[in-house]
Amino acid sequence: MRWQSLPLIIGFVILALIVGARAILVENQSANRLAARDAIEYQQLLSGLLSLAQDAESGQRGYLLTGERPYLEPYQKAVDALPGQLSRIDEMTAGDNARMQQIAGIKDALSQKLAELAETIRLYDAGDKAQAMEVVRSDRGKAAMDHIRASLDAIRRDGGAALQARYLRTDQVESWLRIGSFTALLAIFLLGAYTIRESGRRFREVVLAQDELHRKNIALTSEIRTREKAEAQIRQMQKMEAVGQLTGGIAHDFNNMLAVIISAMNLAQRKLARGEHDILKFIEAATDAATRAANLTARLLAFSRQQPLAPQTIDANRLLTGMSDLLRRALGETISIETVLAGGLWKTHADPSQVENAILNLAVNARDAMGDGGKLTIETANSHLDDNYAAAHAEVTAGQYVMIAVTDTGSGMSPEIMARAFEPFFTTKGVNKGTGLGLSQVFGFVKQSGGHVKIYSEPGEGTTVRIYLPRFFGDEGADLPVNPAETANRPATETILVVEDDERVRASTTDAIRELGYTVIHAGSGEEALRKLGENPSVALIFTDIVMPAMNGRKLAEEATARMPGLKVIFTTGFTRNAVVHNGVLDHDVHFLAKPFTIDQLAAKLRDVLDREK
């Protein structure tokens, strides 16, 4: 407790005592006034008792002297009223033994007097007037009345003295009340003055404290800005370091692949210049390197969440069952595979080919971690990630998910390795054993699909990777993928318009489509394509790049299909943020083939779109 508050507390205690004492005096004053009223009423009751006795005596004498009956009315009224009067006197006398004895003597005398009066009236009524007068002259009644008067006088004297004493006490209490009221007012004034003085002092202290707090806030704000600037610089350095690591990884892998391609093409050129035609192995090497470069690009797009996805309603149990042969071939005979498929599994909405790639990537990683042999378990389950889990994990939305877990009995991972497991180009495998993009590709695809991926692992205890894909609440029926084999062998008789602003890409695409047997018309811009479309109404499909100057592929497709409603369109691009891909998902009813593509992929896509019902 602060010492400055002590006088204020003492003042309030004194004021409380004064107010309490005044309240007690007020109660005492009320009690005195009530007692005074009771004493006055008691005196009036006693006077009334004597008056009734005298009325009874007067009525009896008048009747004896005149013999007329009306003279008995005061007597009768007095006799009727006396019991009630005595009862009220008894109530007010209760508890006072001395007074009760006096009242008892009065009652006895009153009874004697009433008995004497009643006897004379009876004798008179019986015609014995002489005997009645004899009873009157015997002075028995007079003695009783004298006793009554004397007792009542004594009681009235005592009551008057007590009443006078109460009046004196009441005057004293009123004096004390005046003194107490004045003292209370003085105490209130003094307390008010002290409180005002104290409030002023404390207000000045608060102002000084606020000024000090303001100065400290300014200093703290300056320090926060300095720290934020330093943290921003650190974050920028970390970003640049991550970009440098990513760029270095990309450059390393692409340089290796380009080295193979350039070397193979140079050797093929030299052999052809010498008239030699055994160049197949060089072409295969270059094709393989280019394919690996395309896969690397696809993995980088997956990690950056920019790959174009074609989501469908998926039954994960059915998808895993269909992958069983593929997984056995990829893992080999030394790895045993167990699947634990949940009953009543919810549907999810994702790109089925990417889900398969993710499971295959995880299975291959598990195989490499188990070495000479082990057990791979693939499990599905309905799962609910609650608010607490979402709060503890960034980018996780609480809700219902379809969980696919891949568990191995391999070497496991330390916490340090788990923290970097999803980084691109990070790998613990030996040279030429992995690119370090498998888990990063899985991570990017799952995040782009609105899901969550979590690793559970301990060194020597194996690893579990859980993929959570959002539950799909739409139609429960799963979409069925189109089988390319059903349309691959159909003859190519249609005319196709190729639209590409890059001359070299346009030439290679045109040659590839011609190689497939189609009639090809090509254009270098949207305006040229519309003009050639008008000149050639037999065109069945437009194969167009999306990113082009002046008129992009989407605008071209809209204008062309408006002119020719039955026209089919396939979009292609190497850049996914464009007019037909939004939030990483292809627009509805859009046909898309990502660059680069093989001639087999091109053939399957062309045939699939041309054979579809419009």
Image (spheres, rainbow, N blue to C red):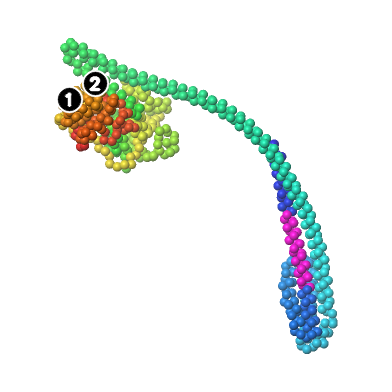
- What count of labels does the image hold? 2
Tell me if residue 92 comes above or below residue 470 in the rendering. below
Residue 417's x, y, as percent?
40, 26
- Which amino acid type is marked by label 2? Glu
- State the mark number for residue 503: 2
Q: Nearer the viewer, residue 232 or 258?
A: 232
**Residue topped by disc 1:** 514
Specify start and end residues of the magenta stretch as a single range: 26-50
Label 2: few (<14), some or many (≥20) within 10 Å?
A: few
Tell me if residue 227 comes above or below residue 450 in the rendering. above
Q: Quadrant of the N terminus?
A: top right
Q: CA distance from mark 2 to mark 1?
A: 16 Å
Residue drawn at (23%, 13%) of the image? 266
Residue 562's x, y, as percent?
23, 34
Residue 148's x, y, as percent?
81, 73
Residue drawn at (49%, 25%) of the image? 228
Label 1: few (<14), some or many (≥20) within 10 Å?
A: some
